[in-house]
Amino acid sequence: MRYVSAAMHIFGGGPRGSKGGPPGAGGATGNIPFVTERDFEQQVLLAETPVLVQFTADWCQPCKTIAPEVEAFAAEMEGKLKVLRVDIDKAQALARQLRIQSVPTFMLFVEQRLGDVQVGALGKKQLRAMVEPFLPRSAGALKARELAELIKQGAVAPVDVRDAAAYARAHLPGATSLPLEELESRLAELYMLPGQPALYDRAGDKVKELAERMAEQGTPVAYLEGGILAWEAEGLPVERP
């Protein structure tokens, strides 16, 4: 079950009626903190980053089953997204106010508003799909399908910054090979391509750093988030010898 309430205010002020239970309750252990009714407003509604809240309970077996995946997801999202838990048995007024019908329920809060709600035992892939539309994106970042569409339109030209051997094994259709260690000394070649250059590497980390550096120098450039690995994970075609 899924429903979305975009740009909906939940409270004028945070719930303060009853005290929440101690951390460590709610059918899960690990590094994800529990938030109480007393501190829900401060920890969730007033947070500077998006917050994913898992509503759970000690008796919830599916919550225990997915706990390792939720923990791993929270670790991957550190710095981009805060993940918290609420024990509905120790925050009953809050659960009623938010109309929690079953657990696990996941609610995503962004800028004091409810961005998305999903009910059920979600794994890492499902959680990532839930939160990604609300995460801040770096300037120039393109997802694989976005890049594929722009290539189809002829608006961008993919540039493979991996070494020549990696390019020879497999590369995006129509990509130009321009190894990373040579790129900054061959910038003129980038802007002689038939479309705006869009850089990619294996996993996206190196081109992200390069794009940030180039933007600071006044030459912004697009890049593929997740690199060729993300491209292949989407089932998009690659050219091989």
Image (tube, rainbow, N blue to C red):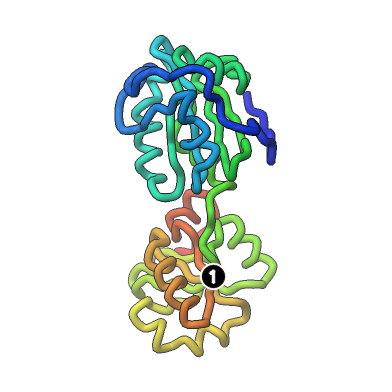
Q: 221 or 134, which lies in front?
A: 134
State the quadrant of the N terminus: top right
Q: Quadrant of residue 113?
A: top right
Element under disc 1 = strand
Q: Is residue 79 above or below residue 171?
A: above
Location of residue 205 with respect to 199 vertically, above or below: above
The residue located at (49%, 47%) in the rendering is 49
- x%, y% of residue 197? 55, 76
Query: What amino acid does circle 1 point to?
Result: Ala
- Tag 1 residue: 222
Q: Nearer the viewer, residue 23 or 74?
A: 23
In the visual, does 51 lie left or right of 202? right
The residue carrying pointer 1 sits among few (fewer than 14), some (14 to 19) or many (20 or more) residues within 10 Å by Cα, namely many
Of the pair 165 and 9, the residue shown nearer to us: 9
Q: Is residue 104 left or right of residue 168?
A: right
* Residue occupying image coordinates x 50% and y 87%: 189
- Picture coordinates of residue 38, whole percent (x, y): 47, 26
Point 35% across, 18% down: residue: 25
In the rendered image, the residue lying farthest to the top is 59
